[in-house]
Image (spheres, rainbow, N blue to C red):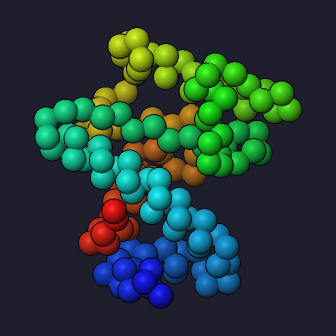
Amino acid sequence: MELEVQLQPGVGVRRLLHAVGEGDLGLLRERMLTDYIYRLTSARLADEQARAGGSAHLFLIGEAGGSIASHAVDVPALMGLHLPDQGPEQDRRDDEITRIVVDFVTGEPLGWPAWGPEGDARGVGELRAPAAETFRTALARWEGVARP
């Protein structure tokens, strides 16, 4: 149980378990893995980039029209496409993702400050909490827990 040993220092992980409740272990697993695999690595990388004098813009993708923001949901939008069976809410979310990516690639301003102590993060779709709060919560929750 290597994962259990790694999580011992993570007091925030215990708070997550308490917040989700012991009855819904599937939801706990989803939130822990999403934090650990995606949000934590992105936020730590952005922190390091800012500390080194560079800039990084954090971006969070949320649900749209009842459709979850699963892994790779952004792939069609990265190519300026829509999935044929999705609704208008997903199309709007994809269009916003496409616009942000094109702005980034072409050097246009993104519309939100780079990540850092005073910086922000941007989200598209329906988020549970503001994007910056979500990333800061992940950093605090996993403080002291190593992540390769």
23 left or right of 129?
Answer: right
> Residue 127's spot in the image, x, y percent?
58, 45
Looking at the image, how many numbered discs can be counted on the residues? Answer: 0
Q: Residue at x 24, y 32 (%)?
A: 55
64 left or right of 108?
Answer: right
Closer to the camera, 21 or 1? 1
Q: Residue at x 30, y 52 (%)?
A: 44
130 left or right of 140?
Answer: right
Q: Image quadrant of residue 74?
A: top right
> Residue 27's spot in the image, x, y percent?
64, 70
Measured along the vertical axis of the image, is residue 127 above or below residue 57? below
Asked if one can make out residue 20 in the rendered structure from this viewpoint, the answer is yes
> Residue 4's spot in the image, x, y percent?
44, 85
Q: Residue furthest right?
A: 85
Q: Residue at x 39, y 38 (%)?
A: 58
Quarter of the rendering occupied by the C terminus:
bottom left
Q: Residue at x 67, y 83 (%)?
A: 23
Measured along the vertical axis of the image, is residue 30 above or below residue 22? above
Q: Image quadrant of residue 53?
A: top left
Measured along the vertical axis of the image, is residue 101 above or below residue 51? above
Q: Image quadrant of residue 112?
A: top left
Asked if one can make out residue 87 in the rendered structure from this viewpoint, the answer is no
